[in-house]
Image (spheres, rainbow, N blue to C red):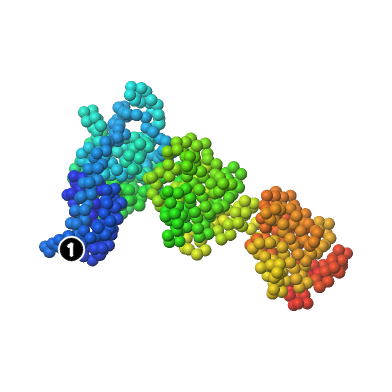
Amino acid sequence: MKSKIKLFLTTCLLAVAFAFPVTTVHADTDTQQILEEYYEEFENEYASFDQTFEEFTSNYYNQPLNSTISEEDQLRDYLNTVNEYYIRKEAEQLSKDPPLWSFNIGNALENITFEKVPTYHKYDLMNIVQPGDIIFERKRAGITPVFLHHVMIVEGIYEETHLINGKPETFNYIRTIEATDYSPILETKAGGVVYGVLDDERFDYTDSTILRVPEATTAQRKAAISFMHGQLGKPYDVLPFDILTKNRLSSRKDWYCSILVWAAYMNATPDGRIDELTDNNDLNFQGIDLEADKWLIDPAITPNDIFRSPKVEKINPFFVNYKDYAENIRWSNAGNPIDGEDFIFSRGSNAYTLRNDYHFIATDKNNGRPYASTRLTFGRNHSGTIVVEFDMFTRFLLTDEARAKFSDRNIPLIPETIEDHDVPNYVMNWINTYTQCSLEIVYSKDISTDNNHLRYNPSFTKITKKKHPVNPYQINQVVHTPPAFTQQRFDYTENLSIYDKYEMTRPNPFNADVSYNRTSLSWYYFYNNYHALIKLENGTYRSASYLRIHGSFTNAASARNGYGFNHDFTMTDEAKAIYGNYFYHIGVNQSVDYVIDWLNQYTKEKTLIVYSNNIDNDLKKLNNGTATVRKAVNDQGKFVYCIL
């Protein structure tokens, strides 16, 4: 079993960092595995980390062997040395960045100050950020000691008037409460627990992430903010000697950033009370412990703890209703598939392609008309104009908001901060937010049929999650549900043989009683003395050796459905209303029973399959009332509908 100690070099407190060992390695832990894990941690943690994995491991194995210490200690010392080097390097780089005025606007509302009006154009922070949200700042420069990460809580969004350069300005802004050592004017404004401002500039400057605590109730979030309020004005804890106790009491004399945020949620209860005394191991504890679940083992609470906590979720800063459109969709950013991926793109290209029976389906929000494609163009052309289209005939119309927000041709549609693995979802969310189409990714083996069901038969069709036919996960698929009348499951073809691969050159090779093509044409042919029997509105009967359903690309399903050579069914008003714009084959991928059910529901005639070895004579008997239709054993020994 393996255990480690938090990389204190990645926390708020540089001075304290070196007082603790970096890692503890047990003898039964595989050294190579530990090196792999720490390499990944260093690579993710430090922008200045520039070693390849080969260099990282080679440096360890090629260092002089110290026979006086164990292999565990030697590995620990090596990781500690690497850690110290890069945290110092990172700290030196960050210390060169001047702090922002928004880090600290004061600790009392009557004297908060602004250097300029906060800006909210790039992100949608005003609509996305909520009171009680936690803001994690990856790159944070302070005075002394140097911060590498920082966390704070959003108090709320406010409209206020303040003097800026001697002129009153009224504006909306996001206000935070945070513990910081930054004091812009040391003589008049101290650090400590203060108010701050979150805007686009700060969000970019510090490489921020919005974290939300989904299990917290509204009252609980308010209680956490209230606890933070009560600590305003207290000094910053430069050397937190009480970290071993994880002191969360409101009587604490000073705070550092992450312990304050942690304490606020630890003390907040779902009903809005503040409970500082109940231990988190007590069954009566109702707070929320934001420390990562022993992600690394040490007594302090760090910003990384909160960032990695299973109790928080990351919130996208660009879209209010951010949705995961690409769940279970494998991607490749190489512009071509590397290992059979589904979603193919490249940061240098405007082309996005789907493979493996996946398709984009865009639905016009104005008229509900769907369009399908495996290729999408999204980006700016050479003149800087935004282009979103399937092809030159299928273009997505932009919203007025998109035209205004992205009018500057220098604004990238996909910001550099969007990591490659987020690109598929970002593109989908952008299109669904800023165009007049809604876009989905669906799996379909027969996209023509599925798209036409969506287009012409929306009452019975939807896009929904359904198990992938091969892989063990759910994926969007087009589901066409038969109309309610087909649920009767009336068996028109009981005891009849069916051939469902009809071709003109091979119409009925197995001498079936009924022959049709299940996947294309909606023509149904009857053999072996079987016939379609049609009862008209006036009670008289006709027969035919075939039925034709004219729902096609040129004829609506509610028009000209017929039987025999020159007879048409009389469609009901309900059929005309529901299927007036449905131009695809009603019978595609459906059974014979389904089609006859459909005819009996939406025509004024009644249709049945009957057996007769002399249909003309039997029709005369039916029409003069000397015969009836009922089930019986025919001369082929089958129990079917006969004219008797």
Q: Residue at the right extreme?
A: 624
Left or right, 80 with reference to 273: left
Work out whether residue 387 or residue 90 is closer to the camera in this orientation and state it: 387
Of the pair 297 and 516, the residue shown nearer to us: 516
Identify the residue under disc 1: 71
Would you say 151 lies left or right of 500 here? left
Where does residue 595 sit, x and y in percent of width and height?
A: 69, 61
The answer to whether residue 310 is above or below residue 66 is above
Say which amino acid is labelled 1.
Answer: Glu
Dividing the image into 4 quarters, which one contains the N terminus? Answer: bottom left
Q: Can residue 200 be seen in this view?
A: yes
Give percent across and percent down for residue 499. Answer: 68, 70
Q: Residue at position x 48%, y 43% from top?
A: 381
Quadrant of residue 340 in the image?
bottom left
Name above or below for residue 635 compared with residue 607. Answer: below
Residue at the (19%, 53%) spot, across then down = 81
In front here: 547 or 178? Answer: 547
Whole-percent x, y for residue 308 in the image: 32, 51
Residue 240 left/right relative to 401: left
Task: Write down the quadrant of residue 528 in the picture.
Answer: bottom right
